[in-house]
Image (spheres, rainbow, N blue to C red):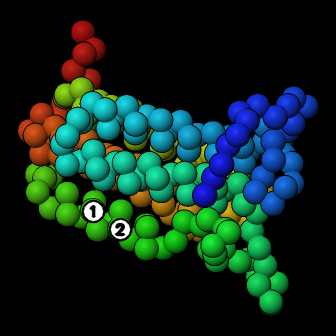
Amino acid sequence: MVKLNKIYTRTGDDGTTGLVDGSRVSKSSALMQAIGDVDEANSAIGLAVIALGDQPMAAALTRIQNDLFDLGADLATPAGADEAGADDFTPSEMVLRIVPSQVERLEREIDAMNAHLAPLRSFILPGGSAEAAALHLARAISRRAERSAVGASETQRLNPAALAYVNRLSDFLFVASRVVNQNGAGDVLWRPGATRG
């Protein structure tokens, strides 16, 4: 269990922050950008949860918020190595990792939601309802988090399941936005060139 007695430590005053293994990195590093973007996506999902109130989708999103804390911890934990020297992203009691079953759960939920939606005839403008707009905002931020995580993975080893999770997340949020928009009936469709004059 995490215990935070003091909020500020002054250890980051030099522009660095600590990773789970005690090593320190620049707060402007690609890894910290990814961790920050995951945190921002989590915050945007929190706004969507509030907008949804007691709708069933809110419970799924709250579970995802918990996953995103796991994801942040995963990104902040450098890769281990197994006996053969290969990357090891095995979770343990002391090491939080995103695992394939979390990605698979998102896929199952996406498929279940999508089964009730009419196929798209056009791209969708972010909106329709306040709840859907909040989910679209969270989706766009989660896409940025994915781009940041991919960027960080170009310079350091990251858990493949973590990268898959953040990729599926934006898909989940897109489909969820259609569900809360009256199963797509409230979607606002893009009309190419319609506003030219």
Look at the image and tell me in which quarter the C terminus lies: top left
Residue 105 numbered tag: 2
Residue 34 is situated, as x and y percent measured from the top left of the image, at 64, 45
In front of the other: 129 or 4: 4
Q: Secondary structure at mark 2?
A: helix
* Residue 85, image quadrant: bottom right
Rendered position, 85 above or below 27: below
Rendered position, 160 above or below 70: below
Residue 122 in view (yes/no): no
* Residue 154, image quadrant: bottom right
- Extreme front residue here? 5
Q: Amino acid at mark 2?
A: Arg
Residue in view at x 19 percent, y 57 percent: 113
Residue 171 numbered tag: none
Residue in view at x 44 percent, y 48 percent: 65
What residue is disc 1 on? 109
Is there a contact, CB below 8 Å, between mark 1 and mark 2?
Answer: yes
Residue in view at x 76 percent, y 63 percent: 78
Q: Amino acid at mark 1?
A: Glu
Is 97 positioned to the left or the right of 50 in the image? right
Residue 183 is situated, as x and y percent measured from the top left of the image, at 12, 45
Residue 157 in view (yes/no): yes
